[in-house]
Image: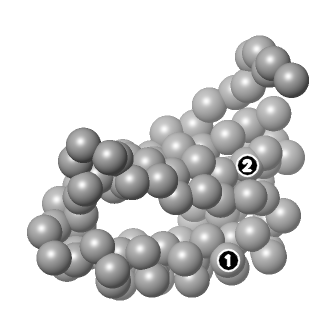
Amino acid sequence: MIYTTGVWTVRQGNDEEFVRVWRDMAQGMADEFAVSPRLMRDVEHSGVFFTIAGPWRDMEQVSEALASPRFADARTALRDHLESIAISTYELVADVQ
């Protein structure tokens, strides 16, 4: 299984707008690609958010999602609210139930 993660550093005072835009984008991705996006905030650094989405069918689906107009529109909408963003892709190698 493939998962994507993101570390989003949000400019001070922009948290609410970031969450709103991310939620809209994530709902669209969930509907279109049948993945489960999650957004978490760092409890020690309130402007840092971590996302995880998946499981993705394969790397082709990840590439399609990251190249989608929905993702591009969200990145454009968030440009002025973010200090940085780092997206990574991971393969699940172990799972404990």
Q: Residue 76's spot in the image, x, y percent?
A: 35, 80
**Mark 1, residue position:** 27
| Three-letter code, disc 2 | Gly
Q: Residue 37's spot in the image, x, y percent?
A: 65, 59
**Number of the label disc, if any, that sits on residue 45:** none
**Could you tell which of marks 2 and 1 lies nearer the N-terminus?**
1
**Mark 2, residue position:** 54
Residue drawn at 67 percent across, 40 percent down? 3
How far apart are labels 2 and 1 at the CA level?
A: 13 Å
Which of these two is toward me, 25 or 15? 15
Q: Is residue 50 above or below residue 75?
A: above
Q: Quadrant of residue 89?
A: top right
Residue drawn at 69 percent across, 71 percent down? 29
Mark 1 lies on a secondary structure that is: helix
- The answer to the question of whether label 2 and label 1 lie on touching residues, with beta carbons closer than 8 A, is no
In the image, taking residue 87 as reference, residue 68 lies left or right, namely right
Residue drawn at 33 percent across, 80 percent down? 16
Mark 2 lies on a secondary structure that is: strand
Q: Residues within 10 Å of mark 2 (few under 14, many from 20)?
A: many
Q: Can residue 72 be seen in this snapshot?
A: no
